[in-house]
Amino acid sequence: MLVKLKILRFDPDNDKAPHFQNYEADVEPTDRVLDALNAVRWYQDGSLAYRSSCAHGICGSDAMRINRTNRLACKTLIRQVAPNITLEPIRGFPVKRDLIVDLTGFFEQYRNVMPYLVNEDPMPTVERFQSPEDRAKYDDTTKCILCASCTTSCPIFWANTDYIGPAAIVSAHRFIFDSRDQAGGERLDILNSREGAWRCRTIFNCTDACPRDIKVTKAIQDVKRAIMSQKL
Amino acid sequence: MYHKYNAIIVGAGGAGLRAALQLSTVSDVAVLTKLYPTRSHTGTAQGGIGAALGNREEDHWEWHAFDTVKGSDYLGDQDAIDIMCRDAVEAVYDLEHMGLPFSRTPEGKIDQRRFGGHTKYEGKEPVMRSCYAADRTGHMILQTLYQQCVKNNVVFFNEYSVLDIIMSDGVCGGVIAMDIGTGELHIFHAKTVLFASGGFGKMYKVTSNAHALTGDGPAVLYRNGIPLEDMEFFQFHPTGIYKLGILITEGARGEGGILLNGTGERFMERYAPTIKDLAPRDMVSQAMHREIAEGRGVDGKDYLLLDLTHLGAEVIEEKLPDVTDFVRTYLGVDPVKEPIPVQPTAHYAMGGIPTDVDARVLADETGAVIPGLYAAGECACVSVHGANRLGTNSLVDIQVFGKRAGDHMARFVRESPLLELPSQPDAPARALLDKIWSANGGELAGAIRADLQQKMMDKASIFRDEASLKTMQEELAKLKDRYQRISLRYKGSKYNADLMETVELGYLLDLAEALVVSALARTESRGAHSRVDYPKRDDANWLKHTMAFRKDNGIELRYKPVKITRFEPKERKY
Ligand SMILES: Cc1cc2nc3c(=O)[nH]c(=O)nc-3n(C[C@H](O)[C@H](O)[C@H](O)COP(=O)(O)OP(=O)(O)OC[C@H]3O[C@@H](n4cnc5c(N)ncnc54)[C@H](O)[C@@H]3O)c2cc1C
Ligand code: FES
């Protein structure tokens, strides 16, 4: 089927402002939006810039605004969004070119929450034990692929890019609720700061945007509750 | 721009990050990666990492070694296989200590599941050896290693594509890379360089591999005179999602899933009576190809069915959540209720850059090493996988040999001086790019790549013979000729994917040629190399590794013996 793609183009070095450019692509309804983008770049316009790699929703490369909602281009089928498809970069980070944004700030937010297991005890010679129940407590947030869909769908973040954002809170949650970790308190202090979890107004955009179906808003609520009980 | 480090690592998948961690406490180290680290293809690995922990039932690393040797169709080097299977156990504990969220047994130990070709008592029945985290084991490995690298302040150059190595008098002194975001070339001057750049499945049309898997490391070294080992062995995984090639883990069969042909028959019972659907991948893919060729595909088409429906919703949702999601998203099929249309998909390169067990790159078939140059992971060939890799053994490979690479590099850094930089080390990389910039014959990289992928699928995939390989050789000559006449349609410097994909296509063409020439010479069938015209394994003549050298007048093939220690080659039956 023939689809119409309207893509927001921008090269900060040469363009004064972003502008839309229209393309047509002949694709199957069961193809991915990424296939349509590839069809354009490979055969029509080699200048189009976007990221991709795995093409099945697992590497987190190709988050973008598709018809005004954050999605992965490789996990959105043409039939879900055809025949008119508008593609824009995710919001809140500087655009490098076309659909590619600068993720430096995003990974800084991530680094700020100590996104690694901290445990100073001597290691056993085998694995540390963890019950399936304890393992289940942080299962949901281990699924994060750092695609930035959630953070860049959040109106609070659009208004204030100092807000640490849902993705970093999800990464913190993954460790705070891991029974093997010993730095939960420090992470909760970080998230209790001015630009931390309290900025969240439970708008749920992040949960809707997550291509991994992580219950992002719930994770943020878990963190807020943990901060409260730590304070008590 | 000029940079200086003791150690440079090319690639931020499981192998590169494991080496980086090992080095990070004893040396300065920088990781160069053309993708953000967490986008690396290790993150897509699903089913598990094999190690004889014995958490679910009796197991021994020696059994793991036996299975790996037999799985390799006796082409794997047994000294290296022993190291891998023995160290696998510690590698898995290491990952747990770093925080990897494995699935757990009721007692809280790392859970394990069955996988193809992994058995107890040397082939008697399947064993639970694959340590897993649902069906996102690779994602967890990649995330965990990256987290630890963040903790240890490893330096990353993200979206840098390595184009060349710096060599002087047979010693490696760094790499040349392009910053994809700016188009600028950078010189990385270093005492040691590790290539951990992954596989090259993108030379085939139907593949489980990511867009980025274009064999950059092997191709760059090959162009610098380093041979490629055992390129004719490319693994097709039995269960790719029909037409798309997206993988459905062998863990699905490990949990009890079965393959059915168009008549509803569980055909693997005929091909491998003992372990049936859990036979190694080469055998299952070949059996599937036969079923389809003999008209037993579904509705006469080129696909078969993977049936999980009898496992029940709970097992499917809990143990295989991601693949269930893929099947629902891309096929609109619910695996809880309906069987899944599947076909074999190009999956894993057994061959690659030849190395010793410390990941040092070998210059030739005699085992001479190139000082300062290392390779590990899918781009390398140690060889632990021989003619056919067992499932779960790549994740072991990248952990064990990634770590060993890091250890050896640390020693090398301590003992060796920095090579003096040759004059204009980036001249060859500039020449490569200039040639692409200035060509204007009107050919499109995308069109050439599509032809390459289709033809490799038709002529050099699961089954080959002399005629098909010769045709492919001629086709490759034509494709290479077209490649000379390519035109870039975009000449900007920032994020120029047109340029990067053209460079990568050049790599794929070189590697495809090495694969085809190596396959044409090997007049036997072994593992994933199945010659219709030579259907038997021929140990008398072919129990040896191929080493393909790129020469001015074509490809020169030399050979080196297989290292055999405990297991004498036997007929392979399951
Ligand atoms: C879908 C799928 C499922 C799998 N499941 C399993 C499994 O369950 N068990 C198992 O054992 N194995 C599995 N495998 C195989 C295994 O995952 C891979 O072989 C392994 O992860 C490869 O790791 P690596 O570190 O060698 O390379 P990769 O993870 O592929 O990383 C390559 C790195 O190199 C970088 N790179 C490449 N070229 C350049 C360049 N020119 N310049 C700079 N950087 C570059 C990339 O950016 C990337 O960071 C699976 C494979 C696939 C495709
Ligand atoms: S390309 Fe990997 S998530 Fe879309």
Image: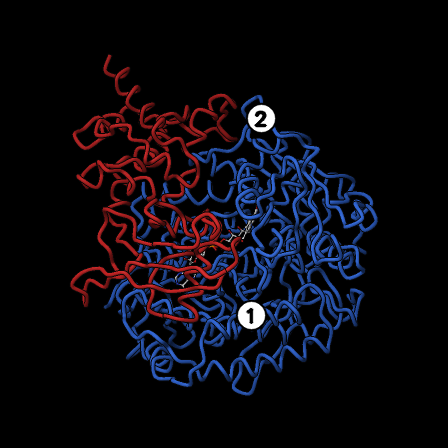
Mark 2, secondary structure of its residue: loop
- The N terminus of chain B lies in quadrant: bottom left
Q: Which of A214 and A137 is in front in this view?
A: A214
Q: In this view, does A5 lie to the left or right of B343?
A: left
Mark 2 closeness class: few <14, some 14–19, many ≥20 residues within 10 Å: some
Label 1 belongs to which residue? B228
* Mark closer to the chain start, 1 or 2: 2
Q: Is mark 1 within 8 Å of ligand 1?
A: no
Q: Where residue B228 appears, x then y in whole percent? A: 55, 70
The answer for which chain carries disc 1 is: B
Horizontal side of residue B41 vs B233, given as left or right: left
Residue B400 badge = none
Q: Which amino acid does label 2 sit on?
A: Thr
Inter-mark Cα distance, 1 to 2: 42 Å
| Picture residue at 44% right of the left edge, 45% below the top | B142
- Residue B13, given in percent of the width and then of the height, sits at 44, 52
Q: In this view, does A10 lie above or below B547?
A: above
Picture residue at 22% right of the left edge, 59% below the top: A18
The chain ID associated with circle 2 is: B
Identify the hue of chain A.
red
Question: Which quadrant of the structure image shows residue B489?
Answer: bottom left
Query: Measured from the top left, where is residue B414 in percent x and y?
Result: 35, 57
* Residue B402 percent coordinates (x, y): 47, 52
Which numbered dot is residue B105? 2
Q: Are marks 1 and 2 in contact (CB under 8 Å)?
A: no
Figure colour of chain B: blue
Identity, as a three-letter code, of the amino acid under mark 1: Leu
A14 in relation to B275, above or below? below
